[in-house]
Amino acid sequence: MNVRAAEVPPPGSQARVVVGATAQALTKVRIRDARRRLLGDVREEEAASAGYDGLDDLKAKWSRARAWDPREIVQIIQFRREVRG
């Protein structure tokens, strides 16, 4: 399987959050941190902050689309929504 890596802006930069199908901008976010980690090393709180109900949910949903490989490298991105004043 050939998967293209997503390009992530560097920490401190801003990015627009868009709806994929319409390309409509929803908001701007500031990238706080971006790091790579082995999939098997993702922690419970990281899975939860990504919108999963913990590690078991991450594993179950990941496995629907592709084989679970704990040696696969993933990117963990932390961001903050930018509020217009």
Image: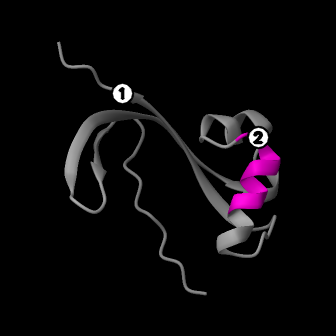
Q: Say if 15 sits above or below 21 in the image.
A: above
Whole-angstrom CA distance, mark 1 to mark 2, is 23 Å
In front: 61, or 72? 61
The kind of residue on which mark 1 rests is Arg
Asked whether residue 58 is drawn in magenta, I would say yes
**SS at mark 2?**
loop
Badge 1 crowding class, 10 Å Cα cut-off, few under 14, some 14 to 19, many 20 or more, is some
In the displayed structure image, the side of residue 21 where residue 48 appears, left or right? right
Q: Nearer the viewer, mark 1 or mark 2?
A: 2
Q: Which residue is mark 1?
A: 81
In the displayed structure image, the side of residue 7 where residue 16 appears, left or right? left
Q: Which residue is mark 2?
A: 54
Image coords of residue 51 (percent x, y):
60, 40
The kind of residue on which mark 2 rests is Gly
Q: Say if 47 sits above or below 4 in the image.
A: above
Q: Which quadrant of the figure contains the C terminus?
A: top left
Image coords of residue 67 (percent x, y):
75, 75
Q: Residue furthest top?
A: 85
Residue depicted at x 33% and y 34%: 29
Specify start and end residues of the magenta stretch as a single range: 53-61
